[in-house]
Image (cartoon, rainbow, N blue to C red):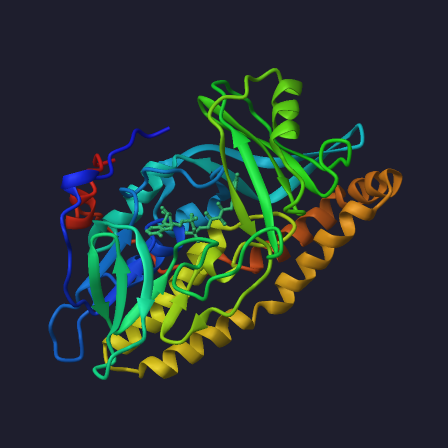
């Protein structure tokens, strides 16, 4: 795990100022949004000022098992961060192991390096600050963001702060809110298979995973029911694989799409419920919707659209994915109720090459890598990259 580098105590000097765009959150969704704003000029010809805020330094805190479709890493110019690639997925269900041959590969990656590579493609300023809320827009249309280091203002704001949706109304909390629970350990070790367990004896509603990442294996369990604790099954799964339960990391995972805008705020990634239900895959969707938000914001800054129009267009873009998200949510609700024999039969049928290829291609289409703009051909050491103190890859 990366060591802590975030400024503490007196080093957290006050900040203030006005920006064209403030992106809150410097993980998958926030960095993808900011990447889309690189080189942006305002309608008056001046360079736009974009600020990214996060409570930690960029890449300091890994937020997931970091497995994603490999084509997304290529689409964003992030191949260097890849640790391992997998052409098949091994599904364990009620004593059966079914090998699914994938039409595209999944890859595990190094979180810190991936964030650093994304940051290199942005030209935003960066500050570590904890965002605590917003105030209603003033007459000048600027919205105030409140942080532990002071207030900042911008007409365009993105909440890419994860499931808490800090800039939205309060009260969206587990266990009432539609959130899954995820926990994993990162024991030292190696492996060559991407494995998933669907078995009620492990977790009544949810699944377990083991994702090798070169020198460690990310082993975890997710429960669709927020009331079910996952520590015991996570340890049990690690023990089954003969791995020590080291390096705990967990979080809530949204499994229901939410409005992608509210007032003047754009929400992207987990803050908008953009994590896919059933699989809890939220990295590529955070990229995808972050890019969409970035494109809409760019239109406003460049004078090609009003803020109201871009907010409306982005909200409609996100909502247009509702059917796919609902279908996965229906499956998420159904699968735990399937009797073991039916689950094993369905998995074997799904393991047929044609069906696997068709279903995984459809699944990828929900947030396809062709949506990404190409990475700049020559990546440069960027102010944001330098400010974050990240080693050049
Ligand atoms: C155990 C576990 C394993 C997972 N494994 C996978 C996986 O392998 N593949 C996959 O696709 N998905 C996985 N997911 C889901 C995935 O992690 C999320 O969907 C994804 O991280 C969402 O990205 P995001 O950028 O929206 O939010 P996040 O990655 O959660 O980033 C939010 C950012 O905001 C910052 N922040 C939060 N609050 C504040 C604040 N108040 N002020 C300032 N900064 C703040 C955080 O520091 C962070 O940098 C997993 C989830 C869990 C819990």
Q: Position of residue 252 (x, y in %)?
A: 53, 46
Where 159 sits versus 20, above or below? Answer: above
- Can I make out residue 370 in this image? no
Left-right relation of 5 to 174: left
Where 21 sits versus 282, above or below? Answer: below
Total marks shown come to: 0
- Can I make out residue 145 in this image? yes
Left-right relation of 93 to 225: right
Q: Position of residue 209 (x, y in %)?
A: 61, 34
Residue plotted at (74% across, 53% down): 333
The residue lying toward the viewer, choosing from 309 and 355, is 309
Image quadrant in which the C terminus is located = top left
Where 369 sits versus 60, above or below? Answer: below
Residue plotted at (55% across, 17% down): 244
Residue plotted at (40% across, 38% down): 62
The residue lying toward the viewer, choosing from 136 and 350, is 136
Q: Position of residue 122 (x, y in %)?
A: 24, 54
Left-right relation of 228 to 269: right
Image quadrant in which the N terminus is located = top left
């Amino acid at each position: 795990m990366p060591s802590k580098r975030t400024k503490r105590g007196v080093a957290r000097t006050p900040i203030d100022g006005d920006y064209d765009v403030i992106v809150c959150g410097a993980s998958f969704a926030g960095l993808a949004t900011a990447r889309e704003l690189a080189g942006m000029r305002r309608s008056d010809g001046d360079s736009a000022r974009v600020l990214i805020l996060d409570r930690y330094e960029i890449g300091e805190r890994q937020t997931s098992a970091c497995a994603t479709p490999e084509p997304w890493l290529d689409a964003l110019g992030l191949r260097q961060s890849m640790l391992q690639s997998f052409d098949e997925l091994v599904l364990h269900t009620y004593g059966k192991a079914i090998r699914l041959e994938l039409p595209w590969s999944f890859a595990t990656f190094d979180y810190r390096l991936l964030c650093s590579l994304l940051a290199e493609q942005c030209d935003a300023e960066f500050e570590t600050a904890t965002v605590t809320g917003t105030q209603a827009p003033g007459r000048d249309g600027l919205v105030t963001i409140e942080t532990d280091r002071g207030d900042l203002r911008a007409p365009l704001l993105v909440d890419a702060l994860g499931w808490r949706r800090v800039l939205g109304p309060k009260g969206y909390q587990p266990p009432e809110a539609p959130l899954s629970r995820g926990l994993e350990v990162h024991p030292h070790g190696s492996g060559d298979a991407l494995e998933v367990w669907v078995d009620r004896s492990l977790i009544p509603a949810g699944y377990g995973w083991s994702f090798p990442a070169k020198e460690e294996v990310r082993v975890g369990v997710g429960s669709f029911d927020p009331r079910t604790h996952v520590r015991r099954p996570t340890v049990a799964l690690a023990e089954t694989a003969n791995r020590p339960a080291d390096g705990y990391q967990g979080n809530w995972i949204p499994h229901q799409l939410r409005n992608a805008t509210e007032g003047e705020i754009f929400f992207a990634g987990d803050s908008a419920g953009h994590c896919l239900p059933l699989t809890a895959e939220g990295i590529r969707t955070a990229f995808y919707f972050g890019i969409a938000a970035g494109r809409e914001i760019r239109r406003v800054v460049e004078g090609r659209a009003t803020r109201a129009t871009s907010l409306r267009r982005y909200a409609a873009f996100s909502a247009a994915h509702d059917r796919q998200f609902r279908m996965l949510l229906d499956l998420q609700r159904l699968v735990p109720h399937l009797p073991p024999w039916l689950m094993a039969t369905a998995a074997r049928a799904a393991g047929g090459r044609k069906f696997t290829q068709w279903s995984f291609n459809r699944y990828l289409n929900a947030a396809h890598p062709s949506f990404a703009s190409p990475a700049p051909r020559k990546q440069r050491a960027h102010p944001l990259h330098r400010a974050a103190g990240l080693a050049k890859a």
